[in-house]
Image: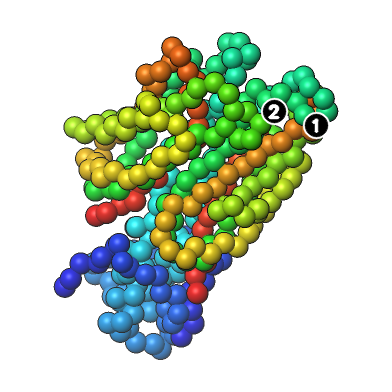
Amino acid sequence: MADINISTATFTSSDMVLESDGTLTLAYGTALANNTGYLAYQMIPVASFNIPVAGAGDTGSVVQDRLPVSMPAYLSAGSWWLYYSFVGTYGAKFHWYTYYLPSLEIAGYGTTLEVDNSSDWGNKSGSLFYYSNGEHITITLTTSNASNSHTGGYFNLHARRIS
Amino acid sequence: MADLNPNGSTGTFNLACWIEPQDKFNIEDMNVLAENTAYLCYAYTPMIVGVHHIKTAGGAPGRPTYYYSEHMASYTWMDAGDYTITINAGTLTNGAGNGTLFTGSVYVDGTTLATFTKELLGTEVPFTNASQRWIYTDVFLNSDDTSQEVDRYYWIGYRKVYP
């Protein structure tokens, strides 16, 4: 028997409810197995966080004081693609001062992934390979520009199982 | 043979689908297994889940000073296909000025999906993605008042529409 390729498996809905006098076929079994593989490949939300852009006039709540932010999460054992994105937005009505996206660190069992955004602003997205031994991971957002800037934007992280 | 309904929104996951080694599986067992795969398709994957904090002060009505960006946005990696996007926006807190004069709007890939001034619960909008790519989702909160503050919580997510 061959393996299910979860990255290419499709979901079959037609003719999948058998009649009581029906006959199981190889095609039916294959479709059912592929349905499970398809579901295994769906995106799983891991973390999301909004760090609002703050103005200097908002004493005591400037964003740089809010970092680092540490978020624990858990990925079951196996290989994963992690999809992260940062979006820093001034909007149309708030666009002064200097801003930086936070940096991302994902630390888990024997692995640390880092995305250094310390000199960037705007949008940044990408994917990372991650192997989990079934341990918790810690997602940390930091900034190295706290002394002279504000840090902001929306961060999210999704995971997709590879195997 | 009948079809599965992976586009449904109500149903149950049937736990009674385990076959003991001494048993013989039958058509009903396989149908339960197939229906369970359809049930798992109901899940939504989040695109933006977070709190948007905004504060305005001073200026003339309709032209206040913004202490935070009125814009929050996110990228989500999505496969090609037809989707249903659900938009939910609640009000966590109302500060100065009652926070009642904000107009919210939600866009996906630059297309307006919803505008609202109060809570928005369970709105569903169709969306088609031609190819696998990062999808840009953004929300705006525009103030018509001179001084007010609000935290608005968003839950925007997608699920696949199956043929």
Residue B60 point in image, percent of width and height = 82, 25
Q: Residue at x 68, y 25 (%)?
A: B66
Decide: few, some or many residues near mark 2? Use Cα within 10 Å; few <14, some 14-19, many ≥20: many
Q: Is residue B106 above or below residue A98?
A: below
Residue A64 point in image, percent of width and height = 48, 17
Residue A92 point in image, percent of width and height = 64, 35
Q: Secondary structure at mark 1?
A: loop
Q: Residue at x 40, y 30 (%)?
A: A120
Q: Is residue A80 left or right of residue B11?
A: left
Of the image marks 1 and 2, the number of the one nearer the N terminus: 1
Q: Is residue B18 above or below residue A64?
A: below
Q: Is residue A40 above or below residue A66?
A: below
Can you tell which quarter of the image residue B22 is in? Answer: bottom left
Q: Is residue B22 left or right of residue B162?
A: left
Q: Secondary structure at mark 2?
A: strand
Chain letter of mark 2 equals B
Can you tell which quarter of the image residue A129 is in? Answer: top left
Q: Work out whether residue A17 can be spotted.
A: no
The residue that label 2 is drawn on is B150
The residue that label 1 is drawn on is B62
Query: Which residue sits furthest left?
Result: A1
- Front residue (pair A119, A86): A119
CA–CA distance in space, label 1 to label 2: 16 Å
Q: Are marks 1 and 2 on the same chain?
A: yes
Chain letter of mark 1 equals B
Q: Work out whether residue B115 can be spotted.
A: yes
Q: Amino acid at mark 2?
A: Val
Q: Residue at x 48, y 25 (%)?
A: A99
Q: Amino acid at mark 1?
A: Gly
Viewer-side label of 1, 2: 1
